[in-house]
Image (tube, rainbow, N blue to C red):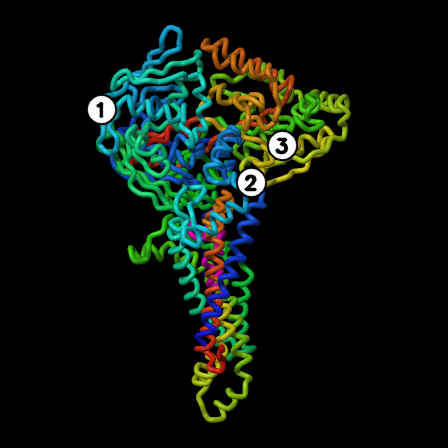
Amino acid sequence: MQRYVVGRLLLMLPTLLGVAVLTFVIMRMVPGDIVELRYASGGAGVSQELIDQERALLGLDKPMYAQFVDWMGGIVRLDFGQSLWTGRSVLDEIAVRLELSIELAVLATLLAIALAVPLGVLAAIKQDTWVDYAIRIFSIGGLAMPSFWIGILIVLVLLTVFYWSPPLTFTPFLEDPLANLSQLIWPALAVGYRYAAVAMRMTRSSVLEVMREDYIRTARAKGAGERLVVVRHALRNSLLPVVTVISLEFAFLVGGLVVTEQVFNLNGIGKLLVDAVAHRDYTLIQALVLLLAFVFVFVNFLVDMLYVVLDPRIRYT
Amino acid sequence: MQRAARRPGVGLALVLAILLAACTQGPARSGAPTGAPSGAAEQPRAGGQLVFIVSAEPPSFDGHKETTFAMLHPTAPHYSLLLRFDPNDLTKVIPDVAATMPEASADKLSYTVKLRDNVKFHDGTVLTSEDVVATYNKIIFPPSGVSSPRKGAYAAVESLSAPDKSSVIFKLKYPSASFLTNLASPWNFIYSAAKLKEDIKYYEKSIMGTGPFEFASYEKGSAWTGRKFKDYFLQGRPYLDGFRAVFIADANAQKNAIQGQQAMIEFRGFTPQQRDDLSRALPNNLAIQEAPWICVNYVSFNTTQKPFDDPRVRRALTLGIDRWAGSEALQKITIVKDVGGLLRPKGPFAMADADLQKIAGFSKDTKASQDKARALLKEAGQENLTFEFLNRNVTTPYEPVAVFLINEWKKIGVTATHKVKETSAYLADLRNKNYQVGLDFNCDFLDEPDLQLAKFYSASKLGAGLNLSHYDDPKLDSMIDAQGRETDAAKRKQIVGDIERYAMDEMAYQWPVLWWYRIIPYNNKLRGWKIGSNHYTNQDLVSVWLAN
């Protein structure tokens, strides 16, 4: 097991290196230039001399391989460089936004689990009754409506009915929990609904499948109550695919809520990434893509480890 | 059963009530101020924090280096200028840290500026002429590795010196008509000489000025706050205790923030629809100010490529546009309005309407213009002209303006395909001559021919990087030089008129479509702020106050 874990951790390195190379090359193939953009505000007009000077200051006049070597050299020393746009440390830029993104992902995940697992199980054990139909309609609604659209509806209802809009700036939870939640609960609801819908359908089908297994029949034959059968035998065994779905969604939420962040004016990782791409801020984009790739790879690794806990039949050697 | 049956009825009633409430709110009259502040009669009230919106974040904090309003709006309240625009009359230049207006020598080759003796930096040090000299040296004569995109505006300056602690002398190589107003440039923050000596790039990441507000905090990606500077040199100012600039990129989120009264104003502007939405939503809490804007879209041609090297083709394309009808239609849906030449219509250098209408594409006789356009295209062998029209992926106002142009060209038999690119790629194409015809843009802080005509200089000379039509024209260069050195206002205006006729009519190198129009709907508790014809000046908040 230990050897497997170390092997899996080491395998992350070539994956991340591949991501780094691809991001580096693709961004430089995309037309456009950070210096052009920096001076585009008042019209497209600044002298070529100034453009060349700024490019040299940012190291963009160097050959591509030299820029790559500089960047990789920095990463080895855990120096991800400075944002080409703001001149500040890339890690600082990310750290400020990461707190919000992770909290939102956690809130949405909690909300999704709280909705998806009980409703999914209920739909399965009440299969083909009005309860099942109602839950399925509710979940299809979540799948059909994009999160950002639900977000827009939430904002409009708050504005037009309650004459109120969520706070514009982020307050850390530990500083003021109420202010924090009054900003984040709304996007968490918008995102959590879709997220719950995905997990709910997965829970339902997984529980239905497990309920047909021999060991469930055996449990019933031994006189176990329905509640015990469902909670102890069916639910635990049906959790593997649900955990996978929830984990991958969580990884996605850390950096993938671009439009929802815009709707609620959230200063998160998704917005930072979009801004970085729009500005052609290479160092920031590279660091962000690496971070998000790491989150995905690491969450996948954790899920694999969780399988062992949930299903004793699984052993990694 | 009875209870269950009632529920849909209650829900329906609620929905109807909301719809009814939405429908019965009075429609706003476009362009009319709603709940406008009564202004002069009121006594300014001290206290309070102004929350305003900025639609982007500042790249760096250095006013000398940046060109975006996103840097100016949060940072301007921390700084003073040598001269400034009068917040009560934004066409007039008045002293800021200067004690009086500069004294010019008889030959207008030397300007002496006396400084106030009570100006302090936020760290408590007293401002002296050394600080002003260091500031302007950085702007006009930047050392290697320091960017100063506006140094060209001070090309006439030969040197500057500080004969004593309270005087600064600017020596010019030749008389410059725009020199004085350029000293009121909103970008020319006065910096501390000591800080610049310590690190010439100190101000890229730090704030330390002599303005009405001290820097308090910057929450990256979120907000910027300032607090009142108690030692500010103007007694009793500023009125506000502080300000908070919140960064909101999305236009709808900006409107929602004003509607939800989480923010009071966004200083750049909203569209007519957003103004009307806010008027309906906040009938008693909204004031609106509107003004012509020194921003314009140009149609630029790649004059290095056939057939756009032919003035007849460029002229035909401007003749094919009915700007007057376009103005009527587009001002209802986007932020363009006035028809004008190379200088802002209704501005101090604007050409009279009668003269303007003699220029190709500006006549009100559309049919005659279009007939002439077709004839010119035929003469140039381009009766079925087809080209790609490059535009940036920004809706307001680029998309509707482009749609209007393409539709107008269709009427003279020209087929233009709308090619929309992301800003960075769009700029790269314009600069690298990788386009046929494109929609360019320009915004300035001042009605000043030296600024607005800068992009008409030859591309291989002073127009490098500015002139995106990529032509060279020594005749036009000398005309632009001549107006810049002419200090007699009437004569200067005449030369500017000649330039407009030559560049827009005869050569039609690049020509304006419609000038922009600035619309600011804001919470009517905000007082003491007056809209100007640009979104750069009057942002130090020194006169702004909040009513109860």
Front residue (pair B54, B361): B54
Q: Specify the subunit that label 3 lies on.
A: B
On screen, A42 above or below A60?
A: above
Q: Residues within 10 Å of mark 2 (few under 14, many from 20)?
A: many
Q: How far apart are the two marked residues, 2 and 3, measured between alpha carbons?
A: 14 Å
Give the x, y percent position of residue B194: 28, 30
Q: Residues within 10 Å of mark 3 (few under 14, many from 20)?
A: some
Give the quarter of the image for residue B92: top left
| Discs 1, 3 touching: Cβ within 8 Å | no
Give the x, y percent position of residue B160: 35, 18
Which residue in the structure is indicated by mark 1? B118
On screen, B326 above or below B276?
A: above
Q: Residues within 10 Å of mark 1 (few under 14, many from 20)?
A: some
Q: How far apart are the two marked residues, 1 and 3, measured between alpha carbons?
A: 52 Å
Give the x, y percent position of residue A179: 32, 54
On screen, A224 above or below A129?
A: below
Q: Looking at the image, which residue sits at the far top?
A: B106
Q: Amino acid at mark 1?
A: Asn
Which range of residues does the magenta coloring cover? A247-269
Front residue (pair A218, B29): A218
| Mark 2 secondary-structure assignment | loop
Which residue in the structure is indicated by mark 3? B433
Q: Specify the subunit that label 2 lies on.
A: A
Residue A32 disc label? 2
Q: Amino acid at mark 2?
A: Gly
Q: Residue at x 35, y 28 (%)?
A: B189
Which-is-in-front pick, marks 2 and 1? 2
